[in-house]
Image (cartoon, grey):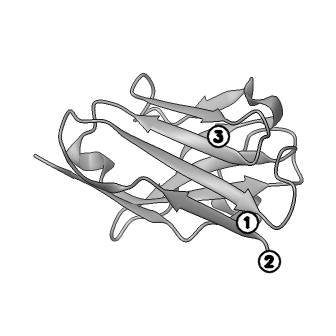
Amino acid sequence: QVQLIESGGGLVQAGDSLRLSCTGSGRIFSKDIMAWFRQAPGKERQLVAAIGFGGRITKYSDSVKGRFSVSRSNAGNTIYLQMNTLRPEDTAVYYCASDPVRTELQAWPTSYDYWGQGTQVTVST
């Protein structure tokens, strides 16, 4: 069974930091593009950050550039999202996703084949 399992979400105050983790199992993810998306209530799911095979190429949404950092383990099956200086507008369910097909980082959710169940991040004022 192919799974992506996120962890690390929670309730924090504005200005705090959180680190999300996502581990894949059931297949080899090390050659995949992997990404973090988020979805706030009533809004579309949007890309937060993506990372390519080997971890050298990354892509961020403008709203998190300079505050968030995506990385992946040497084995490639785990990715992380370090979130610093959190803001109330970062409140959302954060999803991990995997694209096993493409070689260029994609921003559209439909480009990703595998998804985690999501982890809630809530930032209070």
Label 2, label 1: how far apart the Cα atoms are: 11 Å
Label 3, label 2: how far apart the Cα atoms are: 24 Å
Label 3, label 1: how far apart the Cα atoms are: 14 Å
Q: Position of residue 56 (x, y in %)?
A: 74, 23
Mark 2, mark 1: which one is toward the viewer?
2
Along the line of sight, which residue is nearer the eye, 93 or 102?
93
Residue tagged by mark 3?
A: 50
Image quarter (top left, top right, bottom left or bottom right) of the N terminus: bottom right
Q: Residue furthest bottom?
A: 1
Q: Residue at x 87, y 47 (%)?
A: 102
Residue tagged by mark 2?
A: 1
Q: Residue at x 10, y 46 (%)?
A: 125
Q: Position of residue 52 (x, y in %)?
A: 76, 35
Of label 3 and label 1, which has the lower sequence position? 3
Q: Name above or below for residue 99 compared with residue 83.
A: below
- Which amino acid, mark 2? Gln
